[in-house]
Image (cartoon, rainbow, N blue to C red):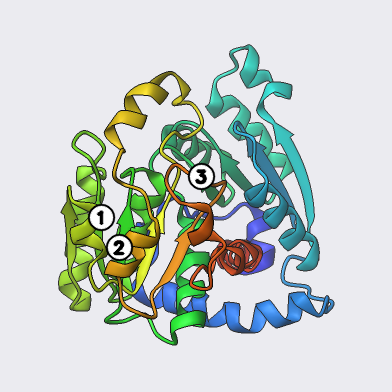
């Protein structure tokens, strides 16, 4: 799709799930990030999104996702428009398909950070422009694109590496299963009973693994997952919108903390990742997130380049 075809309203290429990418697509995006990152850091004048207006419809607060997409849009020559959901007519009951039709006639791309994944599918169906998933209850694909780039940067390769996700089988875990299996990484998710990954996502990840020669497992013992892993990854135990479940979740996730003892079970040169924000003392300890094996801050910085390559993908 050329830049002009985005404006002309031809069939949009959205990115709502990691499953919207082929192995070749993902490999190309990771390779493209290698050149985008230094160019953006140098503040080169880039024109990938010249003339493109990117609307950012956010139902949830955000530090990294909002800032990374706004800065990426500007660095690539586009113009960002932030759309807080409480300031839109959807907050008064306007159907999302009506909002989507109007926004699609004004904007060239929509980035959505929403509670329900169905909101994104409706936006994609009715807006007529590319829609990017900046986080939903089902997936967080742009996070995982950045994560895979970070692993490749720090470990030198992806295929054959083992990633252990310890915690809630939530949106980030779902996208990690799909992304890691697509690039040939082995992935094991350790989740308490009742908090395992989405069954359909797990099925698709297993299909990816068969094609890429990797493995996908879900276990209920975090120590089992951590053994000999190359990457230890965690996320918050209580996500936005789940505050009423906090007490129950705290009990369920006891023992699913990445700490120094858990880190000793991993490979000697394992790296630690967290998509942030982190609740230190809960899912991860302060000494580990600040330790020499943590790549959390590089991971967070790389969200900027992940946002840039995602925008480049849907408009390119």
Q: Position of residue 5 (x, y in %)?
A: 63, 62
Q: Secondary structure at mark 1?
A: strand
Q: Position of residue 300 (x, y in %)?
A: 60, 61
Badges 3 and 2: C-beta atoms under 8 Å apart?
Answer: no
Q: What residue did someone put label 3 on?
A: 135
Q: Position of residue 2 (x, y in %)?
A: 62, 69
Q: Is residue 200 above or below residue 303?
A: above
Q: What residue did someone put label 1 on?
A: 189
Q: Is residue 131 above or below residue 100?
A: below
Label number found at residue 17: none
Q: Residue at x 55, y 63 (%)?
A: 296
Quick one: label 3, few (<14), some, or many (20+) residues within 10 Å?
A: many
Image quadrant in which you'd find residue 209? bottom left
Q: Residue at x 31, y 77 (%)?
A: 267
Position of the C terminus by quadrant: bottom right
Q: What residue did someone put label 2 on?
A: 164
In the image, which is nearer the foreground, mark 3 or mark 2?
2
Q: Is residue 183 above or below residue 285?
A: below
**Distance in Å between CA atoms under marks 3 and 2:** 21 Å
Q: How many marks?
A: 3
Residue 17 shown left or right of residue 30 in the figure? left
Residue 276 shown left or right of residue 200 in the figure? right
């Amino acid at each position: 799709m050329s830049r002009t075809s985005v404006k002309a309203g031809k069939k949009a290429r959205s990115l709502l799930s990691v499953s919207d990418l082929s192995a070749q697509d993902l490999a190309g995006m990771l390779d493209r990030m290698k050149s985008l990152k230094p160019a953006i850091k140098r503040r080169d004048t880039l024109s990938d999104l010249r003339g493109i207006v990117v609307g950012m419809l956010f139902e949830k607060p955000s530090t990294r996702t909002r800032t990374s997409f706004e800065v990426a849009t500007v660095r690539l020559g586009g113009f960002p428009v932030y759309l807080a959901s409480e300031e839109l007519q959807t907050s008064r009951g306007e159907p999302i398909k009506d909002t989507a039709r109007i926004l699609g006639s004004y904007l060239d791309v929509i980035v959505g950070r929403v509670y329900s994944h169905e909101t994104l599918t409706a936006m994609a169906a009715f807006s007529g422009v590319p829609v990017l998933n900046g986080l939903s209850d089902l997936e967080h694909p742009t996070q995982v694109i950045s994560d895979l780039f970070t692993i490749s940067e720090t470990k030198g390769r992806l295929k054959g590496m083992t990633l252990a996700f310890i915690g809630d089988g939530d949106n980030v875990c779902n996208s990690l299963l799909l992304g890691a299996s697509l690039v040939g990484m082995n992935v094991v998710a350790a989740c308490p009973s009742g908090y395992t990954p989405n069954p359909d996502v797990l099925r698709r990840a297993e299909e990816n693994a068969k094609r890429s020669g990797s493995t996908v497992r879900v276990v209920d013992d975090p120590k089992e997952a951590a053994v000999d892993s190359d990457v230890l990854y965690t996320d918050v135990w209580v996500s936005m919108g789940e505050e009423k479940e906090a007490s129950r979740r705290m009990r369920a996730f006891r023992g699913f903390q990445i700490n120094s003892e858990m880190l000793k079970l991993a490979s000697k040169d394992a790296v630690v990742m967290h998509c942030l924000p982190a609740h230190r003392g809960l899912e991860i300890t302060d000494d580990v997130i600040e330790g020499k094996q943590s790549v959390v801050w590089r991971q967070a910085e790389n969200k900027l380049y992940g946002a840039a390559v995602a925008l480049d993908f849907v408009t390119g």
